[in-house]
Amino acid sequence: MKKNASLLIDMLLSGILLILLPGCLGLRDIGLKPGDDLVRKGLDQIRNGEWDAARRSFTDAMYEYDTASVTDDNAYGWCYYGFGVITLHDNDQDAAMTKLLKAKEYFEKDSEPNHYGLGLTKLRIGLIYRDKKELAAAKDNLTGALEDLKKSGVKDASAIFLASHAAGYVLINLREFREAETHLISAEKSYNDVQPPKPVMLAEIYFNLGTVYINTKDYLSAKKYLLQSAGIFEQQPGTDKKIYGDLYYYIGAIYYDEKDAKQADKYLRLAHLNYSQALALYRDAGKSDVVKQIENQLKRIEKVFE
């Protein structure tokens, strides 16, 4: 059985992340300082997916702040955060990182640190480091994000959920399984407060918990969470066949070790079917590394049935 498997999470970086409530932004004297209303407007536009409008709002806010010689670091922090999120939407992670690091710098040097803004900024930075496979930096920022979000007192279940979810994934890859378990269970508990609900993300949490328990040799718990994950993914149209292949393979491998031949046969055959379907798709996409992984899994399954 493969001992170091993990599911690559494709995080939803907009919509679910910014749940902005009146008064929660930490913009002091809102409406009195030039630019504050534009920052709030820009953040709302990000939440609604109005990217071009948001870019204009933050640009105008920066102009207002500069013209009025505003010295509020917190205000500039929100502007750079907004620009960073918009640049992420433009698929330019390097440029986004530059802006988000600037936002972090402003939030941290403000005389009254804005823990909510700092937490959201560290979350975004952590997700970029995760995607770049810079796992130590991802861990520091994601766990730091959780600390700041809790200090802020803002009940943003979506941000806490995403930070816990991503931290768990990163910690699995660092083979820090007990800490990963803690964060993933936290994400599971906060999921019910996430609006709108994203069942696929809950399925990913169950998959990753299954991975944790495989690595800690708690196969009964692993099987429970992997079966729950499969049950959710099976209700989601368009799920990657490789995900099904991975799930069924691990479930089948656990049944095989338990000497439950009937269930092992069922899930390993399902794994073989889905891996075979995924193989053609990944070959056409030119993803040779994934193709090699799938081919190795198919060989392992075929060996069982020899």
Image (spheres, grey):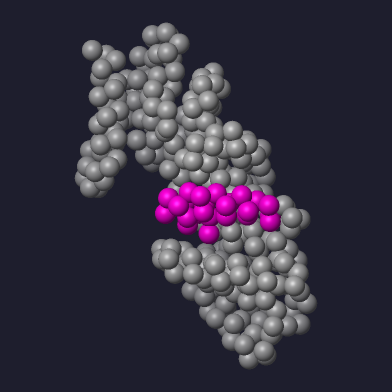
Relative to the observer, which residue lies in front, 306 or 180? 180
Tell me the residue at 30%/31% (across/down): 275
Tell me the residue at 61%/81% (across/down): 61
Tell me the residue at 41%/24% (across/down): 250
Query: Is residue 188 at all visible to an observer of this figure?
Result: no
> Residue 189 is drawn in which quadrant?
top right
Query: Is residue 148 at all visible to an observer of this figure?
Result: yes
Q: Quick check: is 140 in the magenta stretch?
A: yes
> Seen in the image, is 138 located left or right of residue 158?
left
> Residue 295 is drawn in which quadrant?
top left
Percent across and percent down for residue 24 are: 73, 63
> Seen in the image, is 258 located left or right of residue 81?
left
Tell me the residue at 76%/69% (across/down): 112
Relative to the observer, which residue lies in front, 178 or 145? 178
Q: Quick check: is 198 in the magenta stretch?
A: no
Percent across and percent down for residue 231 are: 49, 28
Q: Which residues are magenta?
A: 125-149
Percent across and percent down for residue 264 are: 39, 14
Percent across and percent down for residue 131 are: 43, 52
> Residue 248 is drawn in which quadrant?
top left
Q: Establish if 302 lies above or below 60.
A: above
Q: Magenta segment, principal secondary structure?
A: helix
Is the N terminus in the top left, top right, bottom left or bottom right quadrant?
top left
Relative to the observer, which residue lies in front, 8 or 167? 167
> Seen in the image, is 3 located left or right of residue 42?
left
